[in-house]
Image: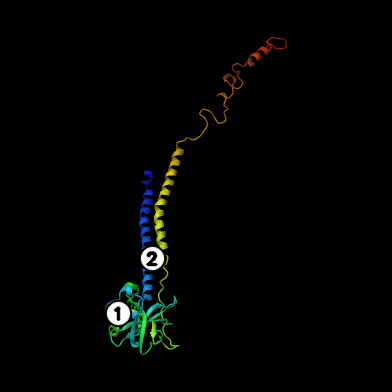
Amino acid sequence: MFRVLLSRQWVMLTLVALLLIPAFIWAGNWQYDRHDQRVARNELIGGSLAAPPVPMSELSAPGEAPDPDDRFRGVTATGRFDASQEVVARSRTGNQKGVLGYFVLTPLVPDEGPAVLVNRGFVPAGNDPTRMPEVPPAPEGEVTVTGRLMVDETTETTGIRDTQGLPEGMVMLVNSEQRAEAAGMPFLSGHMVLTELEPELPDGAEEPERLAAPGHSGIGAHFAYALQWWLFAAMVPVGWWILLRRELADAAAGEGGSDQGPAGPAPGRGPDTPADSGPSGGDAADGGPDAPREGDDTGERNDADAPAVGSPGVPAGR
């Protein structure tokens, strides 16, 4: 057994098995972590959506990001929309997947205190991506906005590249610090995704498509994938042992067959030689088939019955 394990083939196979086991275990743990994160996110979203709205100024301040645990929490703010500082965020999707367009970002300026960056919703892209899309105007006058609190987007947290040199009025990130610098006034950190307006718009008035609440019921297949990877890790040593036993069985069978010589005729006897034939091929003088045997009186009777030489009827020369 140890000689087999020291062969080059089995050394390589064993090393591969030893590498696969921790790799499969790591992959299973990673999928399980993804499962835990998904469950925690669902619980966070569900709890935040169920909580009663509070003023956004209670959860955020200029330069102080909201607590990540307060994401998706219902918040309110009162003020007037500043359409002169309105921009759109590129390469976004609305409630219909696969339809590209823009988020409409409009500052809400209160009578006192910092402004609030409001995501009013989604508009589809036009035929020319280098031109501003047609955006329904923001309501005039004082309004109270209710929405979901979100943290500012950055390249590090979203993977969205903050491309410079975009057409005027377009941005890549929904970021209150960038909008505060561009507008020259303070903003509460984070932004709000609009869900309700008070007073509501008149019937038939156009507005951007309001974004639906994020789903928080599905957990995906991460847990099943984790079990699958762990099962693969358990199967590696089992498969290694099965292959080893088969190798040892084949080796034993080969050694057993080599101990027996090849079957063949007995020494000194040709394949066509009769068992009772002598070397002379049946000569009576050498004990062939015509030679008299001990106790057989046939020869004597033949000699007795044979007529003597010179007898009548028998020639003398015979």
Q: Is residue 186 left or right of residue 29?
A: left
Question: Please, is residue 197 above or below residue 2 in the view?
Answer: below
User: Would residue 131 be seen by someone viewing this image from the given angle?
Assistant: no
x and y, in percent, of residue 213 in the image: 40, 76
Give the residue at mark 2: 35
Of badges 1 and 2, the one in the foreground is 1
The residue under the point 32% across, 80% down is 56
x and y, in percent, of residue 214 in the image: 40, 74
Crowding near the residue tagged with mark 2, few <14, some 14–19, many ≥20 C-alpha atoms within 10 Å: many
Name of the residue lying farthest toward the right: 313
Question: Please, is residue 11 above or below residue 24 in the view?
Answer: above
| Residue 122 falls in image quadrant | bottom left
Give the mark nearest the N terminus, 1 or 2.
2
Give the residue at mark 1: 58
Dot 2 falls on a residue whose secondary structure is helix
Q: Which mark identifies residue 239? A: none
Q: Amino acid at mark 1?
A: Glu
Question: Please, is residue 277 above or below residue 116 in the view?
Answer: above
x and y, in percent, of residue 164 in the image: 32, 79
Crowding near the residue tagged with mark 1, few <14, some 14–19, many ≥20 C-alpha atoms within 10 Å: few
x and y, in percent, of residue 44 in the image: 36, 72
**How many tags in the picture?**
2
User: Would residue 301 be seen by someone viewing this image from the given angle?
Assistant: yes
| Residue 68 falls in image quadrant | bottom left
Question: Please, is residue 284 above or below residue 160 in the view?
Answer: above
Name of the residue lying farthest toward the bottom: 141
Residue situated in front as seen by the camera: 147 or 173 = 147
